[in-house]
């Protein structure tokens, strides 16, 4: 029997699938593209089932089944986002109606007014030489976060410093933080809802200042390390206008999965994390993490189909990098299912101080900047570097 016609049809199908996958959005124009999706039911703890492995990121919250089609992802993504806000960090407020922005050549300023209260953000801006508009990175604390600034400066990337303390202190006093002047009713809000809100308001300002501040809004990144690595991850997960997220050494409560971390040693578990960063009510799951309807492989998956690079450091046991590795393997399945596996990477090594990127990791970071901020499609972002060859990550992924 002549199978040539079938072979050509198969080849044509595979080729078309690959092309369409690469055409999936690299970034969105809206903070959340799924606002029209139906909100999921969010049961109390005693009505939640116990799930000992990592939950299936493609399984609908109502138990109706799984759907791996990209067309279904926007609403499934919003179910996960709703769960994370409800059970873990609190509601991230939407963009306020009253928001104005100015730029003085060195810094941008954002003024937000709501319910008689006001909040003002300022962010130092470092613009490169050359033709604009420039891709830009929002760094936590300083313009490049904890990454070497030359990785961005030498590539013509603008650097914008986010001062998170202008939104909420590192160790918040609930109800008394700057953001509470706008949202006094949200005293339960964790820092990882508040700080990403601040990052989003910086992006709002960039949108308002397009005629004065030459930043390419389709080429924005966010980065930070340690607690700020968590902050960068939550920011990228919650705002689809961010094209590239680089979460450096985010530890427990970042990329590491709560369930996996429970099986390790002296690491940051759900019961041992800093609750200034989360909802106090999350403590009820400290001895029952299996009751959470999500885990942090799904937090990372919220970034898909956009780009995410996660960096680890095995010299610090507290960071739970074996848990990060398992979680990253699980999250990667989302990107791979959509045919865009090169948009997610993880690089976990040791031999260097906390939040000080070793030269061995510069090429991986550079490749992600080149591809997703500069548009170099030849950059190699197939990055899955780790020291855990004996770890059976598949046992956590029954789906």
Image (tube, helix red, strand yellow):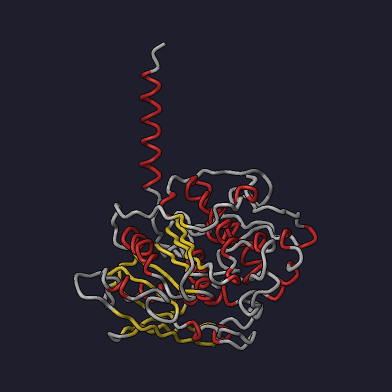
Q: Give the residue displayed 51% in from the left and 68% down from the top.
A: 313
Tell me: residue 1, above or below residue 11: above
Between 151 and 266, the one lying in front of the other is: 266
* Residue 193 position in % (x across, y down): 57, 73
Q: How many marks?
A: 0
Report if residue 162 is visible in the image.
yes
Image quadrant for the N terminus?
top left
Between 71 and 100, the one lying in front of the other is: 71
* Residue 375 position in % (x across, y down): 29, 58
* Residue 26 position in % (x across, y down): 39, 56
Q: Quadrant of residue 9?
A: top left
Q: Residue furthest top?
A: 1
Q: Residue furthest left?
A: 130
Image quadrant for the C terminus?
top right
Between 66 and 179, the one lying in front of the other is: 66
* Residue 215 position in % (x across, y down): 30, 71
Tell me: residue 351, above or below residue 336: below
259 lies left or right of 1: right
331 lies left or right of 356: right
Q: Residue furthest right?
A: 46
Q: Give the residue displayed 29% in from the left and 52% down from the top.
A: 378
Q: Give the residue displayed 25% in from the left and 76% down from the top.
A: 128
23 lies left or right of 350: left
Report if residue 96 is visible in the image.
no
Tell me: residue 293, above or below residue 206: above
Q: Quadrant of residue 39?
A: bottom right
């Amino acid at each position: 029997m002549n199978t040539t016609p079938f072979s050509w049809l198969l080849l044509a199908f595979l080729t078309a699938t690959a092309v369409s996958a690469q055409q999936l959005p690299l970034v969105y124009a809206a903070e959340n593209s799924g606002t029209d999706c139906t909100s999921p039911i969010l049961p109390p703890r005693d009505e939640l089932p116990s799930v000992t492995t990592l939950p299936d990121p493609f399984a609908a919250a109502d138990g109706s089944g799984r759907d791996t089609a990209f067309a279904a992802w926007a609403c499934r993504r919003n179910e996960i986002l709703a769960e994370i806000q409800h059970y873990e960090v609190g509601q991230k407020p939407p963009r306020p109606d009253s928001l104005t922005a100015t730029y003085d050549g060195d810094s941008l300023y954002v003024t937000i007014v709501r319910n008689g209260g006001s909040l003002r953000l300022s962010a130092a801006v470092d613009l490169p030489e050359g033709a604009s508009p420039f891709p830009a990175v929002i760094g936590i604390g300083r313009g490049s976060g904890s990454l070497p600034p030359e990785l961005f400066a030498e590539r013509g990337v603008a650097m914008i410093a986010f001062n998170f303390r202008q939104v909420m202190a590192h160790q918040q006093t609930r109800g008394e933080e700057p953001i509470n002047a706008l949202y006094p009713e949200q005293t339960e809000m964790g820092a990882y809802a508040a700080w990403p809100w601040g990052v989003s308001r910086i992006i709002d300002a960039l949108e308002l200042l397009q005629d004065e501040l030459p930043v390419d809004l389709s080429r924005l990144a966010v980065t930070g390390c340690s607690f700020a690595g968590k902050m960068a991850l939550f920011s990228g997960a919650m705002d689809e206008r961010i094209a590239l997220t680089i979460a450096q050494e985010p530890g427990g409560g970042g990329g590491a999965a709560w369930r996996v971390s429970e099986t390790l040693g002296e690491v940051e578990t759900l019961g041992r994390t800093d609750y200034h960063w989360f909802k106090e009510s999350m403590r009820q799951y400290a001895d029952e993490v299996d009751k959470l309807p999500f885990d942090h492989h799904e937090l990372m998956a919220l970034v898909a189909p956009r780009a995410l690079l996660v960096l680890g450091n095995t010299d610090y046991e507290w960071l739970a990098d074996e848990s990060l590795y398992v979680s990253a393997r699980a999250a990667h399945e989302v990107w791979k299912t959509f045919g865009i596996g090169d948009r997610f990477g993880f690089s976990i090594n040791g031999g260097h101080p906390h939040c000080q990127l070793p030269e061995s990791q510069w090429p991986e970071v550079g490749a992600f900047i080149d591809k997703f901020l500069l548009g170099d499609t030849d950059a190699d972002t197939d990055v899955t570097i780790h020291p855990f060859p004996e770890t059976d990550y598949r046992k956590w992924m029954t789906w």
